């Protein structure tokens, strides 16, 4: 039975991939571009060349971090969409500290940006957690509104306290070299940052913590059954607050990665670039599995990078990548619904009583007793 379920899941996922490829081929063909030519350009623009491969992997790191934050929060039963704001505040905090760390050795300067980014994201998430835990405000509502506030905070910072452009542009000063996250020098343009090691490390860490530790068990219990959690001595509210704060920390580090491992060594008011919401989409694409998030993040990042290559070389509209991303998410959700229905039917069949005639044939003793 386990083998059959596994084969079913693999088959459904392959069907999603085939469906996405077919949809992409139909979209490019509709605008007069050869699907084969588009596939060649897409591959070269994402994985075929070392420079583009580095860009794809580097851009997948913030998506992975946000996705892991979403998974941690949902394990505790908390659904919030405050990741864009937490990415912005985490990146802003990292910028404010990083600009003052020019005299520090690189390891300390980089560590300062990482820690400050995490603390900034946690601080912004703490507002959502406090409003939910003490005031009863739905976290999905408060976090969505706080995203709008964070956008204005970033706009004020790059036009005020952190503004460092000589021509008055809304951006900070150039980051000191010691704060830039180290990159692989073997690739031209330094597009591959060493923060790609976070892809497997963070995914494995979250898997282990959620499945092999008491802390993870308490989070899952709080999110699975609040009444049972209380009877077991687990406070669902306390665990929910912890999950929201941890998710904010992941998002804050993602904000720091966008700035200090990115191609532009300064902060502008649009640096978040929808990473917060795209990270949620990555988690959905991975079906909330931390083990599958690295692959999903790379796949999602490749759509962004490949879409840019298609636009530059074949004049394909840049919005097509976003449309394809949305289509992939819809296909994944449909596949999840189909799998859930299949599991439910099997469970119902297993629990249904045997037919009356079969029951009489199998056990004639009750009939003899009645006679």
Image (tube, grey):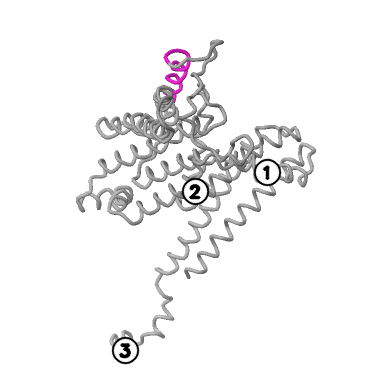
Instruction: Decide if residue 318 is on the left or right side of residue 153.
Output: right
What residue is shown at x 30% (from left), y 88% (from top)?
Answer: 371
Q: Is residue 86 above or below residue 337?
A: above
Q: Disc 1 marks which residue?
A: 49
Residue furthest top in the image: 167
Q: Marks 2/1: CA distance?
A: 24 Å
Residue 42 in percent (x, y) is at 70, 42
Q: Marks 3/1: CA distance?
A: 79 Å
Query: In the rendered structure, are the residues bearing label 3 and label 1 in contact, judged by CB atoms less than 8 Å apart?
Result: no
Marks 3 and 1, the one that precedes in the sequence: 1
Query: In which quadrant of the rendered view does residue 130 lie?
Result: top left
Magenta-tinted stretch: 145-161
Report crowding for label 2: few under 14, some 14 to 19, many 20 or more residues within 10 A (C-alpha): many
Q: Marks 2/3: CA distance?
A: 60 Å
Report crowding for label 1: few under 14, some 14 to 19, many 20 or more residues within 10 A (C-alpha): few
Q: Nearer the viewer, mark 3 or mark 1?
A: 1
Instruction: Decide if residue 8 is on the left or right side of residue 253.
Output: right
Tag on residue 26? none
What residue is shown at x 31% (from left), y 31% (from top)?
Answer: 126
Residue 286 in percent (x, y) is at 50, 49
Q: Disc 2 marks which residue?
A: 293
Q: Disc 3 marks which residue?
A: 368
Instruction: Decide if residue 143 is on the left or right side of residue 369.
Output: right
Q: State yes or no: residue 159 in magenta.
A: yes
Residue 261 in percent (x, y) is at 51, 34
What residue is shown at x 53% (from left), y 47% (from top)?
Answer: 285
Q: Nearer the viewer, mark 2 or mark 1?
A: 1
Q: Secondary structure at mark 1?
A: loop
Marks 2 and 1, the one that precedes in the sequence: 1
Q: State yes or no: residue 23 in magenta.
A: no
Report crowding for label 3: few under 14, some 14 to 19, many 20 or more residues within 10 A (C-alpha): few
């Amino acid at each position: 039975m386990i083998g059959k379920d596994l084969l079913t899941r693999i088959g459904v996922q392959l069907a999603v991939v085939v469906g996405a490829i077919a949809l992409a081929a139909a979209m490019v063909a509709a605008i007069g571009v050869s699907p084969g030519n588009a596939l060649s350009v897409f591959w070269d623009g994402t994985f075929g060349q070392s420079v583009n491969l580095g860009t794809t992997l580097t851009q997948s790191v913030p998506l992975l971090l946000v996705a892991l934050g979403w998974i941690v929060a949902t394990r505790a039963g908390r659904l919030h969409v405050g990741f864009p704001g937490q990415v912005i505040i985490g990146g802003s905090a990292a910028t404010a500290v990083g600009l003052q760390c020019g005299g520090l050795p690189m390891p300390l300067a980089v560590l300062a940006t990482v820690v400050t980014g995490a603390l900034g994201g946690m601080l912004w998430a703490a507002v959502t957690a406090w409003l939910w835990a003490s005031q009863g405000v739905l976290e999905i509502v408060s976090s969505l509104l706080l995203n709008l506030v964070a956008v204005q905070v970033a706009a004020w910072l790059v036009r005020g306290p952190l503004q460092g452009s000589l021509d008055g542009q809304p951006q900070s000063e150039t980051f000191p070299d010691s704060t830039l996250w180290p990159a692989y020098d073997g690739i031209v343009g330094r597009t591959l940052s060493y923060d790609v090691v976070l892809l497997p490390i963070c995914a494995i860490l979250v898997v282990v913590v959620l499945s092999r530790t008491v802390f993870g068990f308490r989070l899952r219990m709080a999110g699975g059954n609040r009444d049972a959690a209380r009877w077991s001595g687990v406070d669902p509210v306390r665990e929910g607050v912890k999950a929201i704060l941890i998710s904010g920390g992941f998002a804050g580090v993602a904000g720091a990665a966008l700035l200090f491992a990115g191609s532009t060594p300064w902060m502008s008011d649009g640096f978040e670039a929808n990473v917060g919401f795209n990270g949620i989409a990555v988690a959905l694409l991975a079906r909330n599995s931390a083990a599958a998030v690295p692959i999903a993040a790379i796949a999602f990042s490749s759509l962004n990078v490949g879409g840019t290559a298609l636009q530059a070389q074949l004049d394909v509209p840049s919005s097509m990548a976003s449309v394809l991303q949305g289509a992939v998410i819809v296909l994944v959700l449909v596949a999840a619904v189909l799998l859930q229905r299949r599991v439910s039917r099997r469970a119902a069949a297993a629990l249904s009583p045997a037919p009356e005639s079969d029951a009489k044939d199998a056990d004639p003793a009750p009939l003899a007793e009645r006679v």
